[in-house]
Amino acid sequence: MSLDPTLRPAVPADAEALAALAARTFQETFGADNRPEDMADYIQRAYSVRRLSEELCATDQRIFVAEHDHALVAFAQLRLGPPPSCVTSPTPIELQRLYLDRPWHGRGLAQRLMARSLAEARALGAGSIWLGVWEHNTKATAFYRRQGFVTVGVHQFVLGEDHQQDLVMVKVPA
């Protein structure tokens, strides 16, 4: 048994395990603060095996997983595409998701996934990396600030029928 999870690019065969991890971590993080029907709607649309299979094969996505004892315990996802208008830095790339199973919080895994994401962003030629984080997710916002991200604006995030506000944060990968 290894002590630290192994980081690796996700592959199509990871779709089922990745969908389960994504749904579980999203529910754990946001379930207590949102309506169950909004959570169920979002999870069904965003984290189905079919949806994750498509994202794993998409050329505009890069997904990295952390694996421990043959189980996925965390993942990060980069997405190429147009940023919100408040992101004015050159050639930005989005850190769309960075989720960890709760037992791995506070153990340095988020920092490892962030470093891997920043390295991949640099390799793709990104001049900056941006993300959206729910304005009420103070733990994640504090983590991103410690990683050098700064808030540059806000954008809307739709969770079921609930329209929420995300902070848009940007970092120039060193």
Image: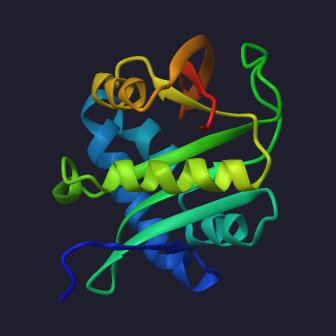
The image position of residue 122, as x and y in percent, is 69, 48
Residue most toward the front?
A: 174
Q: Residue at x 47, y 26 (%)?
A: 148
The image quadrant of residue 81 is: top right
Relative height, residue 2 to residue 85 (above, below): below
Relative height, residue 7 to residue 134 (above, below): below
The image position of residue 15, as x and y in percent, is 55, 76
Number of marks in the rendered image: 0
In-front residue for pair 47/100: 100
Relative height, residue 5 to residue 112 (above, below): below
The image quadrant of residue 88 is: top right
Left/right placement of residue 92 relative to residue 154 reads: right
The image position of residue 32, as x and y in percent, is 24, 34
Left/right placement of residue 63 relative to residue 72 reads: right
Left/right placement of residue 1 relative to residue 149 reads: left
In-front residue for pair 59/113: 113
In-front residue for pair 121/104: 121
Q: Residue at x 18, y 76 (%)?
A: 3
Q: Is any atom of residue 74 visible in this view?
A: yes
Q: Residue at x 82, y 27 (%)?
A: 90
The image position of residue 1, as x and y in percent, is 18, 89
Q: Residue at x 76, y 29 (%)?
A: 83
